[in-house]
Image: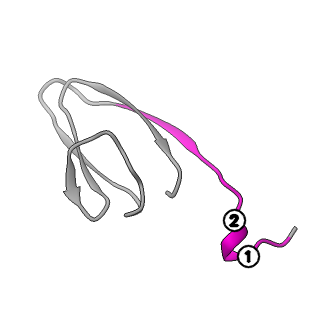
Amino acid sequence: MKTSPRHRLSWSRTLTLTLPPNAAGELVVHRDEKLNLKSLGQGRFVLPAGQTVNLELKNT
């Protein structure tokens, strides 16, 4: 099946991350991702220490 830039198939993935209580992190994804995390700009996001985050990625 051929696709053009206007007719791309839509795919998504779910990513679950758990960080230890004493370690925050940073996640780098495609700049078009819209995530419910604090943004550091240009596809960079803060991962909170001691929490589990479930993310749906559509562009990465």
Q: Classify residue 46 as left or right of residue 7.
A: left
Q: Is residue 6 above or below residue 26?
A: below
Residue bearing the label numbered 1: 4
What's the residue at 72%, 67% (across, down)? 7
Q: Which residue, as the protein is rendered here, is positioned at the far front? A: 6
Q: Position of residue 17 (x, y in %)?
A: 37, 33
Q: Is residue 53 above or below residue 4?
A: above
Task: Inspect the image, locate mark 1, and give the three-letter code of the amino acid beneath it.
Answer: Ser
**Is 30 covered by the magenta stretch?**
no
**Is 4 covered by the magenta stretch?**
yes
What's the residue at 42%, 61% (across, down)? 32
The residues colored magenta run 2-17
Label 2 CA crowd tier, 10 Å (few <14, some 14–19, many 20+): few
Res 50 quadrant in image = top left
Q: Classify residue 8 as left or right of residue 16.
A: right
What is the number of the mark on residue 8? 2
Task: Inspect the image, locate mark 2, and give the three-letter code of the amino acid beneath it.
Answer: Arg
Q: Position of residue 20 (x, y in %)?
A: 22, 26
Q: Position of residue 22 (x, y in %)?
A: 11, 28
Quadrant of the frame with the N terminus: bottom right
What is the number of the mark on residue 20? none
Label 1 CA crowd tier, 10 Å (few <14, some 14–19, many 20+): few
Q: Secondary structure at mark 2?
A: loop
Q: Which residue, as the protein is rendered here, is positioned at the far left? A: 22
Q: Secondary structure at mark 1?
A: loop
Q: Is residue 33 above or below residue 46?
A: below
> CB of mark 1 within 8 Å of CB of mark 2?
yes
In the image, 22 versus 30, the foreground residue is 30
What's the residue at 27%, 41% (across, down)? 37
What's the residue at 38%, 57% (across, down)? 29
Q: Which residue, as the protein is rendered here, is positioned at the far bottom? A: 4
- CA–CA distance in space, label 1 to label 2: 6 Å
